[in-house]
Image (cartoon, rainbow, N blue to C red):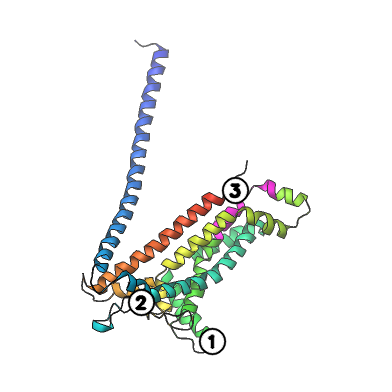
Amino acid sequence: MLSAKQAAKAAGIEKRASRNVVETAIGTVLLVCASVSVMATIAVIFSLSSETIQFFAQPRVTFREFFTETRWTPLFSGSEQFFGIAPLITGTLLVTIIALIVGVPLGLGAAIYLAEFANDTTRRLVTPVLEILAGIPTVVLGYFAVLFVTPILQRFIPNLDFFNPLSAGLVMGFMILPTVSSISADSMRAVPGKLREAAYGLGATKAEVATKVVFPAALSGIAAAIILAMSRAIGETMIVALAAGQRPTLTFDPRETIATMTSFIVQAATGDQPAGSLASQSLYAVAAVLFLITFVLNIISQQIVRRFAEKYE
């Protein structure tokens, strides 16, 4: 028979073995999850690249025309068919700029208030409201822009088209507001309290501490929040498809109807273009450009966080 000491040792070995089995199983499941995510990304890249290569392999399409031509009419036929993506890019930038002008100041103001001025009760009330705003379906926001915002703007702005980037950008600004405010507030709350105490000890006011101490210390996280919000605005679909229009126009006038990259994708995907046609392949070419833009912005966001993140001991 085993002694009590040997029995305890054997039980410990068995317990460690069972624990190792569980940890190995958990690690395997997590590895599968990560692999699925990577494989899905690779599948998306392969799908976009294959169709895009076929698009540029067509004799009627060249890189020069694609990036320099000012007309975008791939859904037309014959001599009226042009493949210049510039109108879609300018339309996307116009809506995104308007959204950032609205969303960034309001989001940063909300973040500074929640992180530095609000008490616990107010913070518990305001934070869920911002989360609800982030959870509103964008199709609802799109109809809100068309049926509510645009009629109001038309009363004050002459020659404003019914479909316009101004109303789409304004509503999109409120859509990205929670992204800016939540990430920025988290970055500000991560600033050590010792910095605040030192500033108060030197006679700084609460506003001075928030704007001259906490804000600069959290600047890397704030910059990342703005870039992520920009990526979301660029990739937004339903708001621009419903409110901005689907007429590719090379203009920076927010009163005119435009088309963005995402709105064209919706237009082409819901049409009756045959598979393998130039019109169908142009959809993938636009999607590839959109993917590259958002991918680059995400990389820039990560680099900003790594490069300018403050380290405290």
- Badge 2 or badge 3: first in the primary sequence: 2
- Residue 191 sits inside the magenta stretch: yes
Q: Tags 2 and 3 in contact by the CB under 8 Å rule?
A: no
Three-letter code, disc 3: Glu
- Residue at 42%, 13% in the rendered image: 5
CA distance for labels 2 and 1? 31 Å
CA distance for labels 3 and 1? 45 Å
Q: Which residue is mark 2?
A: 69
Q: Which residue is mark 3?
A: 310
Query: Which contiguous range is marked in magenta?
Result: 181-195
The quarter of the image holding the C terminus is: top right
Dot 2: element: loop
Residue 221 on image: x %, y %: 55, 55
Residue 299 on image: x %, y %: 45, 55
**Nearer to us: label 3 or label 1:** 3
**Nearer to us: label 2 or label 1:** 2
Q: Which mark is residue 157?
A: 1
